Image (cartoon, rainbow, N blue to C red):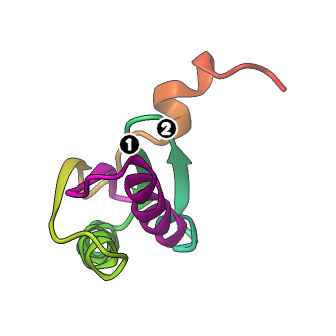
């Protein structure tokens, strides 16, 4: 794993429920990628190979349009290091509640 991303998609629609439906479609695609995926209240974080992650970013744009958004803005954070990046657990594991 040489990269991690955090992506927030913001479809340009008027209705709040339309926003939720479109964002849910993008999240569903990300969760179906087989990569480690953590959904948060503002963004979804994934870890994997940089090329695969960038393809998912592109997919999210197209999914939002196909789901009915006339346009979409996305905010993406990328951490890349060929020798490997910190995992989600490395970054936030100590803050999660023990189950």
Q: Residue 74: give x, y in percent of width and height.
A: 19, 54
Q: CA distance from mark 2 to mark 1?
A: 5 Å
Q: Secondary structure at mark 1?
A: loop
Residue 63 or residue 79, whichever sits in front:
63
Task: Please identify the quadrant where the C terminus is shown.
Answer: top right
Residue at x 31%, y 75% (from the top left corner): 68
Residue at x 32%, y 67% (from the top left corner): 53
Residue at x 25%, y 69% (from the top left corner): 69
Q: Is residue 6 magenta?
A: yes
Please state the extent of the stretch shown in magenta in the rendering: 1-29
Residue for badge 1: 43
Residue for badge 2: 40
Q: Are marks 2 and 1 in contact (CB under 8 Å)?
A: yes
Residue at x 65%, y 22% (from the top left corner): 96
Task: Please identify the quadrant where the N terminus is shown.
Answer: bottom left
Q: Residues within 10 Å of mark 1 (few under 14, many from 20)?
A: some
Q: Secondary structure at mark 2?
A: loop
Q: Is residue 27 magenta?
A: yes
Q: Residue 2: give x, y in percent of width and height.
A: 33, 58
Q: Is residue 98 left or right of residue 40?
A: right
Q: Quadrant of residue 70?
A: bottom left
Q: Residue 12: give x, y in percent of width and height.
A: 20, 57
Image position of 37 with respect to 62: above or below? above
Q: Quadrant of residue 54?
A: bottom left
Which residue appears farthest toward the right when viewing the image?
99
């Amino acid at each position: 794993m040489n990269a991690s991303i955090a992506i927030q998609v913001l479809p340009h629609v008027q209705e709040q429920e339309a926003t939720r439906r479109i964002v849910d479609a993008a999240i569903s695609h990300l969760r179906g990628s087989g990569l480690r995926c953590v959904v948060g209240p503002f963004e979804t974080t994934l870890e994997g190979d940089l090329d695969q992650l960038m393809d998912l970013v592109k997919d999210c744009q197209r999914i939002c349009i196909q789901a009915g958004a006339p346009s979409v803005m996305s905010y993406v954070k990328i951490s890349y290091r060929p020798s490997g990046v910190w995992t989600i657990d490395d970054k936030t594991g100590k803050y999660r509640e023990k189950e």
